[in-house]
Image (cartoon, helix red, strand yellow):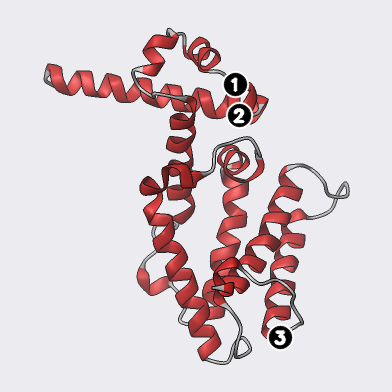
Amino acid sequence: MGVKERQEREREAVARAILDAARDLFVAEGYHNVSMRKIAERVEYSPAAIYSYFPSKDDIFFALAEEGFRILFTPPPGATASDEPSDSVEQLRRGFWRFYEFSRSHPEYFALMFVDRTVPRINKDWERFGFIRDMKARLGATIQRAIDAGQFPAGSHPDGIARVLMTAMLGAAVGRLCHRGVPGEDADALARDTLEAALTGLRAGSPTTFVSRRDRC
């Protein structure tokens, strides 16, 4: 291994240590309460050294959020295109259930991305999150196919359906993550029932009052 390659590996290892330390501190103490100095102390580096890797605490958050979203959107190991169901509603069911499973398999990322109210909004660094726009477009197309096939009532708005399903699963995930359930109850079963109830209501055309900002345009 050459000197340049060794230096690059060492730099990647330090950056990884900074991100891991920051993620743990953000979740344990809240993003707002963690300073760059505190992160530096955790990895036993000087604050100046930390700044040479990440210019600000916000940059650390954006790097972690990008990692988290890529984990969320990455298909399970061994999955292939042929494994994707042809039924649009089943695609939605699996996709939103994967969101819930992400809260179980990566609770630190989930808490940082979806629970902590003090983190910066990702639209402050939107260019690096372009892949999220692509995923939202694919989700909207899947919902529109379901509407066109009569699986949701005619006139339904794809963005409104997506927001209702996301809110349902976010509530289920946060409830489990924050231990808000009744002792001994099956949080996963409740989450699955919540998803099915939301899908059933939307497919039945239950009255709604929510109109997304996109639908107002």
Q: Position of residue 196 (x, y in %)?
A: 70, 73
- Would residue 108 be visible to someone looking at this image? yes
**Residue type for callout 2:** Tyr
Mark 2, other Cα within 10 Å: few <14 / some 14–19 / many ≥20:
many
Q: Position of residue 34 (x, y in %)?
A: 59, 21
Q: Is residue 49 left or right of residue 188?
A: left
Q: Nearer the viewer, residue 53 or 197?
A: 53
Taking the spot 74% from the left edge, 66% from the top edge, the residue there is 194
- Would residue 77 be visible to someone looking at this image? no
Q: Secondary structure at mark 3?
A: loop
Point out the image quarter for the N terminus: top left
Taking the spot 43% from the left edge, 43% from the top edge, the residue there is 66
Q: Quadrant of residue 67?
A: top left
- Position of residue 122 relative to residue 185, above or below, is above
Count of picture labels: 3
Taking the spot 39% from the left edge, 17% from the top edge, the residue there is 51
Q: Position of residue 136 (x, y in %)?
A: 47, 64
- Position of residue 26 relative to residue 162, above or below, is above
Q: CA distance from mark 1 to mark 2?
A: 6 Å
Q: Which residue is mark 2?
A: 31
Q: CA distance from mark 2 to mark 3?
A: 40 Å
Q: Which residue is mark 3?
A: 205
Q: Which residue is mark 1?
A: 34
Q: CA distance from mark 1 to mark 3?
A: 46 Å
Of the residues under marks 1 and 3, which one precedes in the sequence? 1
**Residue type for callout 3:** Gly
Taking the spot 36% from the left edge, 48% from the top edge, the residue there is 127
Mark 1, other Cα within 10 Å: few <14 / some 14–19 / many ≥20:
some
Q: Position of residue 104 (x, y in %)?
A: 62, 47
